[in-house]
Image: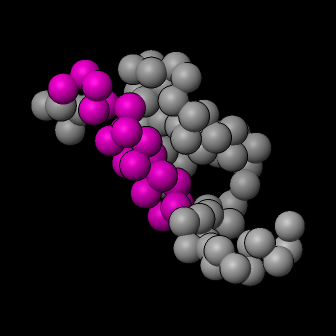
Amino acid sequence: MARHLEDDLVPAAATVAGFAAYRFGNGVLALEALELALKASPHYRLAQMLMAALQAGIPPAALSRIGCGDREEAEVND
């Protein structure tokens, strides 16, 4: 996939692919995709965070609520 993208699109696309692979339990594919994202853009923050989670052994199910948080609930808990 990444071979067919403009260079500036690779980090985002590879990070999305890495997130999806990680979320569905394919750690090897997630690692490869996140490494590609970071190779293209070493400071791509989302790829860095997902790579850290993967390396820390955080289970994929823990990622299920990312992006689905209730804003009001988050503000109450702060």
Quadrant of the rendering where the N terminus is positioned: top left
What is the magenta segment's predominant secondary structure? helix
Q: Residue at x 45, y 21 (%)?
A: 41
Q: Is residue 64 something one can see in this rendering?
A: no
Q: Residue at x 54, y 66 (%)?
A: 67
User: Is residue 12 positioned above or below 8 on the image?
Assistant: below
Quadrant of the rendering where the C terminus is positioned: bottom right
Between 10 and 35, the one lying in front of the other is: 10
Q: Is residue 56 left or right of residue 30?
A: right
Residue 22 in the image: state x and y as whole percent.
Answer: 52, 54
Count the labels in the image: 0
Check if residue 11 falls in the magenta segment. Answer: yes
Between 25 and 34, the one lying in front of the other is: 34
Between 28 and 44, the one lying in front of the other is: 44
Q: Residue at x 53, y 37 (%)?
A: 47
Residue 51: name its quadrant. Answer: top right
Q: Is residue 24 something one can see in this rendering?
A: yes
Q: Residue at x 41, y 27 (%)?
A: 36
Residue range corresponding to the magenta coloring: 6-25
